[in-house]
Image (tube, rainbow, N blue to C red):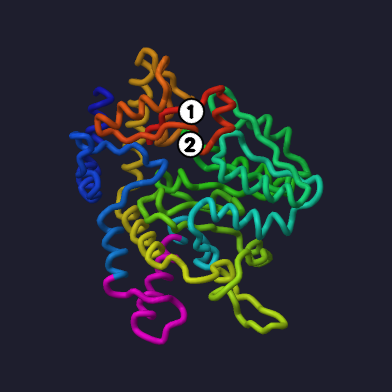
Amino acid sequence: MSEAEVINRDAARFDVEAVRRQFPILQEQVNGHPLVYLDNAATTQKPDAVIDAIGNYYRHDNSNVHRGAHALADRATASFEAARGKVAGLINSPSPEQLIWTRGTTESINLVAYSWARGCLGQGDRILVPVMEHHSNVVPWQMAAAECGAEVVPVPLTPDGEIDLAALRALLDERVKLVALGHVSNVLGTVNPVKEIVGLAHAVGGLVLVDGAQAMAHHRVDVQQLGCDFYAFSGHKMFGPTGIGGLWGRRELLETMRPWQGGGEMIETVTFEQSTYQGLPYRFEAGTPNIAGAIGFGAAVDFLLGLDREAVERYERELLAYVIKRADACEGLVRVGRARHVTGVFSFLLEGTHAADVGMLLDQQGVAVRTGQHCAQPVMDYYGIHGTVRAS
C-alpha cells in the first residue's frame, strides 16, 4: 500500500471531509482558488460550534459574571465557569481553580514572570531557555531577570533541532530556579521531552514552565503526567477564539504568588488602609473577563473531545511523514529542522528564492502559509538564516 493510500485509508476512518465541513471559512475562495489553510501555528480556524457558542452568548445571555442578581448573570456565570471546568479537564488539572483565564500564552508567561519570578529570583539565579523558543518565552524572563539580578541562559540545540540534553544537564545546578521551554517548537515542530526535562530540573530544585501553545491542538496534554509546575496556552491555536488563554499552575505555587493586576473581581475587601484578595483563581483575574471568549473556548474543547483524537494523531503523523518524504525528494528544497519527534509544523526554504516570495506565490494559488522569523529570531540566528516558509 502506498503512503497516499495509507493516508486516504486513515482519513476514511474519521472522515476528514466531515470535519472540514464544520469550518465555514474553508469554503472560501482566495485568488480564484479554494482556500488551503496551512497557517495553523499562527492561529487555527474556528468550527461552527465555536462561532455559534459565542453568538448564542451575545444573543441570549450577555451579562457580566459573578456579580449580577438576575437570570442573565446567572446563566453567563454558569457558562463561564463550566468552560473553565472543561479546559481544566482537558489538561487533567486536579481542580478548576488551578486554571487561570488570561488573554493567551504570552500573558500567561508574563503573569508567572511578574507574580512568581519577581518574588523568587535573586542575584546570581538562572533561568534556562532553549534557543528554539518563541520570543514570548524569552523576553518576559529577560525583563524579570534584569530587575532581580538573575540571568537568562540559552540552552543549545543539536544540529537536527532538538534540545541538547547533554548541554542542559551541564547547565543544571543549584543556581537554576526555572527552565522555561516549549512543548512543541513553533518553527521546527520539535516535540520536546518535557517529562524528562522536568525530572532533571526538579532534581536540582528548579521549576519548569511549559509553553503549550503549539501542543494543545495536536496532543492530549496531561499536566499531572508531565509533572511541570506551570503550563501556558492559548485558545485561538486550538480552534477557540482569540483573546483567551489559560495558565495552569501547581496550587502550592499559585497560592504564594502575588496578584499582578488590581481591580474588581480579584478583591475580597477594600479599605483605604488595606485590601485583601480572593483565593484561586480570581486573585489573578482582575476586571471584567473575556466571557464570550471563555465560552467559545469551552465549545472548542467540546469540539476536540468529539473527535477521535487517536485517529487524528495517527493521520497527522502519516501526513507529516508523507510531506517530509516528498520534500526531501524535491530538488532545491531545504528542510529546516530534522528532529526525530515532530508534530504538524514544517519549515523550509527554496534555494535562490526569498521566503516571502514563496509565500506570495503560494497565496496566488490559494495556499496560506507564514513566512519570516515566526517570532523566534534566536533559532533563525542559530541556523544562520533570515526566515523560513512555514506550513502548519
Q: Quadrant of the N terminus?
A: top left
SS at circle 2: loop
Q: Which kind of residue does numbered mark 2 sit on?
A: His
Q: Earlier in the sequence, mark 2 or mark 1?
A: 2
**Residue drawn at the location 47% of the way across and 57% of the way down:** 245
Distance from disc 2 to disc 1, alpha carbons, whole Å, reads 8 Å
Dominant secondary-structure state across the stretch colored magenta: helix
Whether label 2 touches label 1, CB < 8 Å: yes
Pick the front one: 368 or 186: 368
Pick the front one: 39 or 181: 39
Q: Which kind of residue does numbered mark 1 sit on?
A: Gly
In the image, 389: left or right of 365?
Answer: right
**Residue drawn at the location 51% of the way across and 38% of the way down:** 375
Residue at the spot of label 1: 387
Query: Which span is picked out in magenta?
Result: 59-87
Labelled disc at residue 374: 2
* Residue extending furthest toward the bottom: 69
Per the image, is 86 magenta? Answer: yes
